[in-house]
Image: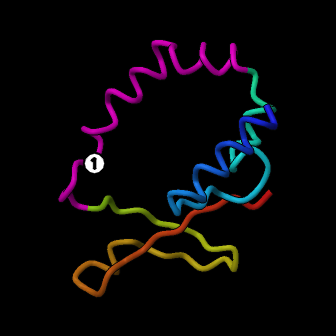
Amino acid sequence: MRLFWKLVNRISQLFGIHPPPGPAGGLWSWQYLDIVKTARMVMSKRVKAIYKAFPDQHPPGSQFPQIVLETTDGLTIDTRSFLGQKHFVLFTGAIT
């Protein structure tokens, strides 16, 4: 396996393509996945239905839905208050 990644790195250098940093060209997290469980999940009817319905949820050009959000400081933000102003970028994350 190590020889394979050395070959990938050498070919990428020849073509001027730089792979992501880290072991296995950035794909090291695949070592920790249960391939059978992942395949079952991806092929399940429920997940396929979610992927199939996704393009219809909010097609390009549709209005951004009104959402009332609370910040970590306790402030409340209503997305409708940004309507008609400059670009609005919403970053989300999880605090664990």
Q: Residue 76's spot in the image, x, y percent?
A: 54, 76
**Label 1: few (<14), some or many (≥20) within 10 Å?**
few
Q: Residue 5's spot in the image, x, y percent?
A: 72, 41
From the viewer's perspective, tell me whether residue 84 is left or right of residue 82. left
Report the front residue among 74 and 19. Answer: 19
Give the residue displayed 24% in from the left and 38% down from the top.
56
Q: Residue 66's spot in the image, x, y percent?
A: 35, 62
Q: Of all residues shown, which one is farthest toward the front?
A: 14
Residue ID for mark 1: 58
Report which quarter residue 85 is drawn in: bottom left
Give the residue displayed 60% in from the left and 80% down from the top.
75
Report which quarter residue 83 is drawn in: bottom left
Above or below — where is 16 with respect to 33?
Answer: below
Please tell me how many numbered marks the rendered image carries: 1
Report the span colored magenta.
35-63
Is residue 40 rendered magenta in the image? yes
Report the front residue among 74 and 16. Answer: 16
Report the front residue among 21 and 42. Answer: 21
Q: Residue 78's spot in the image, x, y percent?
A: 42, 73
